[in-house]
Image (cartoon, rainbow, N blue to C red):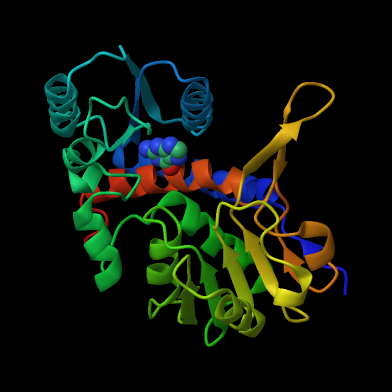
Amino acid sequence: MAAKLIKGAEVAAQIRAELKQEVEELKAKHNIVPGLVTILVGQDPGSVSYVTAKQKTSHELGFYSIQDNQEPDITEAALLALLDKYNKDPKIHGILVQLPLPKHIDSNKVLYGINPDKDVDAFHPVNVGRILIGNYAFLPCTPAGCQELIYRAYGDPKGKEVVVVGRSNIVGKPMVAIMIQKRVGANATVTCVHTGTPKDKMIEHCRRADILIVAAGVPNYIQADWVKEGVCVIDVGVNRIGMTESGKAKLAGDVDFAAVSEKASFITPVPGGVGPMTITMLMKNTVMAAKLAAGLVKL
Ligand code: GUN
């Protein structure tokens, strides 16, 4: 079987079109303009390119949007004071502090300093707890993007065997929490395998998967003989494996794409699969934060 490609950029464009319409309606009916601030400490080139893309998309959707650049030597106390200012600003509904932060700043302390109702990354422990309980406003952007891709391309995962490879706080753990929810787009039977899983068991679990979600951080880790015919594969990996002739980073996912796509029914490419969804889900969270602040949705 040659797998159908799940094209993240197309799905992301569709969701952005839906969001744009929702933003127009919020403005027309309720005089609400979603507000997002992205805070960047220092000038790490990767982080600069991420926040630039986030700002560009939020402007395209008609948000009130601020890029707040801070010097790399800002103190932790000054950064917390800045968060306090945005926590109190009624025009700002979503606050994002771009990671990683310089070593002299405790990232957890900073992330915990964001008002959970403005935490559009959904990294605050209050939001992590809300997600597990099933009463939440935001989902972390990358696993939420994976869920959207599965639902819109493959269909409802209800009752399916989902295997998640990796247990990071940003992807693996929230992915498990999302897929076990008693909701449309979830309701799956979920297994999480990780570095503590013996290799033979890892392969055994992967082979059972109807839907395999891989966030292992190891290029070309998942082999064709680890998957069953017809599996839907979501590859979250973005690994730099060299340079192209034109001097761009050459990327590989965590899945041996060429071989696995011969057996899978659906597969995400790298790049162009999960990647384009992440920023789109941040925009979705910001719209939700604006509705939450206005009392249009309740937790
Ligand atoms: N750095 C890399 N990815 C992310 C993300 O999703 N959110 C934040 N805040 N920083 C990041």
**How many marks are shown on the rendered structure?**
0
- Quarter holding the N terminus is bottom right
Position of residue 264 relative to residue 63, above or below, is: below
**Dividing the image into four equal quarters, which quarter contains ligand 1?**
top left
Residue 294, percent across and down? 22, 46
Residue 203, percent across and down? 63, 77
Residue at figure coordinates x 19%, y 23% from the top left: 79
Picture quadrant where residue 215 is located: bottom right
Picture quadrant where residue 78 is located: top left
- Quarter holding the C terminus is bottom left
Residue at figure coordinates x 73%, y 33% from the top left: 242
Residue at figure coordinates x 21%, y 35% from the top left: 110
Going by the picture, which residue comes out furthest to the bottom?
159
Picture quadrant where residue 149 is located: bottom right
Q: Is residue 246 visible?
A: yes
In the figure, is residue 200 to the left or right of 288? right
Residue 41, percent across and down? 33, 20
Residue 153, percent across and down? 68, 66
Q: Is residue 23 visible?
A: no
Position of residue 124 relative to residue 233, above or below, is: above
In the figure, is residue 274 to the left or right of 81? right
